[in-house]
């Protein structure tokens, strides 16, 4: 096993809470210098302070992933502070239930802008640095709600389209970036117990029905996604690129 990330620099978007925070804490524990990025500078700082208190290195950066200028600034500050960008965890996302027949163009655009355009912009900005170094890893967080190998979910037309887009983007980026020794993979989480899941206002009956379909009969923990992020970010997965790894307690089984 080679999950040591000593001297590696990781940018994690949407890292003030939920899975992104769990990723930041775990990657810092194994030696990575971590950039905690999200839309609230204060809350990013709290996570960065926690990492530093535990003996790690971290930098808090306010970055809205729909804003190209803020993304470029985030990459610039990362290189100024830590000298390089080795790992990007594209994690920031939203999930707002709305019946398809009532969905507005604005709601569709908001979700696609954050969940898909944001992944493109962050991947491109980081890959430009990684290409110069001739090494890098991009881990995209999609969802089991993405069609193809995954499933659909009523009320999430925009979300499922964005997550399916991430899966497609992953495969193409894996091809285009392999010559630069940059690996690109996607994790498709099932139902994970995070603030997003809590705030999605999922009908308790729907949650019960969902849990009944999950062979392990429980939601996953953010740490159970973070351990997969670490695997994909490390040399343990050195021959894996263009893959979609499902972490769902057996939901799709
Ligand atoms: P979370 O707790 O809501 O964390 C996501 C973070 O991203 C939040 O801090 C959120 O801030 C931030 N964010 C939203 N818009 C942003 C923007 N424009 N720029 C930067 N940051 C932004 O959610 P999570 O459950 O950890 O989800 C993390 C990822 O996993 C998402 O991509 C999600 O779609 C995916 N996922 C989650 C589940 C699940 O069951 N939880 C399952 C499958 C996939 P705000 O709260 O202010 O919006």
Image (cartoon, rainbow, N blue to C red):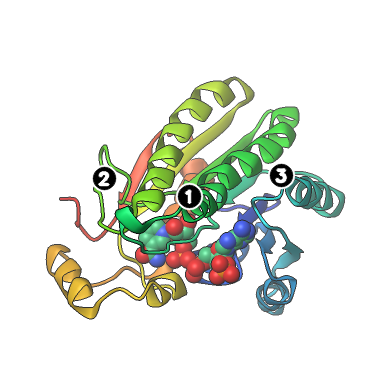
What residue does disc 3 label? Answer: 85
Asked if residue 123 shows in the view, the reply is: yes
Which type of secondary structure does the marked residue at label 3 adopt? loop
Q: CA distance from mark 1 to mark 2?
A: 25 Å
Q: Is mark 1 within 8 Å of ligand 1?
A: no
Determine which quarter of the picture holds residue 208.
Answer: bottom left
- Distance (Cα) linking label 1 and label 3: 35 Å
Tag 1 near tag 2, CB within 8 Å = no
Earlier in the chain: of badge 3 and badge 2, it is: 3
What residue is shown at x 45% (from left), y 50% (from top)?
231
Callout 3 crowding tier (Cα within 10 Å): few <14, some 14–19, many ≥20: many
| Image depth: mark 1 or mark 2 in front | 1
Q: Residue shown at 30%/51% (left/top)? A: 144
Left/right of residue 218 with respect to residue 53 in the rendered view: left
Q: Is residue 167 left or right of residue 49?
A: left
Q: Nearer the viewer, residue 18 or 196?
A: 196
Q: Is residue 234 visible?
A: no
User: In the image, is residue 89 above or below residue 174?
Assistant: below
The spot of residue 27 in percent (x, y) is: 58, 60
Q: Quadrant of residue 220?
A: bottom left
Q: Residue 213, percent across and down?
A: 13, 63
Q: In the rendered image of this protein, does residue 175 appear above or below residue 96?
A: above
- Above or below residue 54? Residue 70 is above
Q: CA distance from mark 3 to mark 2?
A: 31 Å
Please tell me which of labels 1 and 3 falls first in the chain.
Answer: 3
> Which element is circle 2 on?
loop
Residue labelled with disc 2: 150
Q: Badge 1: few (under 14), some or many (20 or more) residues near its Cα, within 10 Å?
A: few
* Number of residues whose C-alpha sits closer than 10 Å to that of mark 2, classed few (under 14), some (14–19) or many (20 or more): some
Q: Which mark is residue 105?
A: 1
């Amino acid at each position: 096993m080679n999950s040591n990330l000593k001297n590696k620099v990781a940018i994690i978007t949407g890292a003030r809470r939920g899975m992104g925070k769990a990723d930041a804490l775990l990657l810092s524990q194994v030696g990575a210098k971590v950039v905690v990025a999200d839309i609230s500078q204060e809350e990013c700082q709290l996570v960065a302070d926690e990492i530093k208190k535990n003996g790690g290195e971290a930098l808090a950066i306010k970055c809205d992933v729909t804003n190209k200028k803020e993304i470029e600034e985030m990459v610039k500050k990362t290189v100024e502070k830590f000298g390089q960008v080795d790992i990007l965890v594209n994690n920031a996302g939203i999930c707002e239930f709305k019946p398809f027949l009532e969905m507005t163009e604005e709601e569709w655009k908001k979700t696609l802008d954050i969940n898909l355009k944001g992944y493109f912009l962050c991947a491109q900005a980081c890959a430009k640095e990684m290409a110069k170094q001739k090494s890098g890893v991009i881990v995209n967080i999609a969802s089991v709600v993405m069609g193809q190998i995954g499933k659909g979910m009523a009320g999430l037309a925009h979300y499922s389209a964005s997550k399916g887009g991430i899966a497609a983007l992953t495969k193409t980026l894996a091809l285009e970036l392999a010559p630069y020794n940059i690996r690109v993979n996607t994790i498709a989480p099932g139902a994970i117990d995070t603030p997003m899941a809590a705030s999605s206002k999922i009908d308790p009956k729907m949650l019960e029905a969902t849990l009944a379909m999950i062979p392990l009969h429980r939601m996953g923990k953010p740490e159970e996604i973070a351990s997969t992020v670490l695997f994909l970010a490390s040399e343990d997965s050195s021959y894996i690129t263009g893959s979609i790894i499902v972490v769902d307690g057996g939901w799709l089984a």
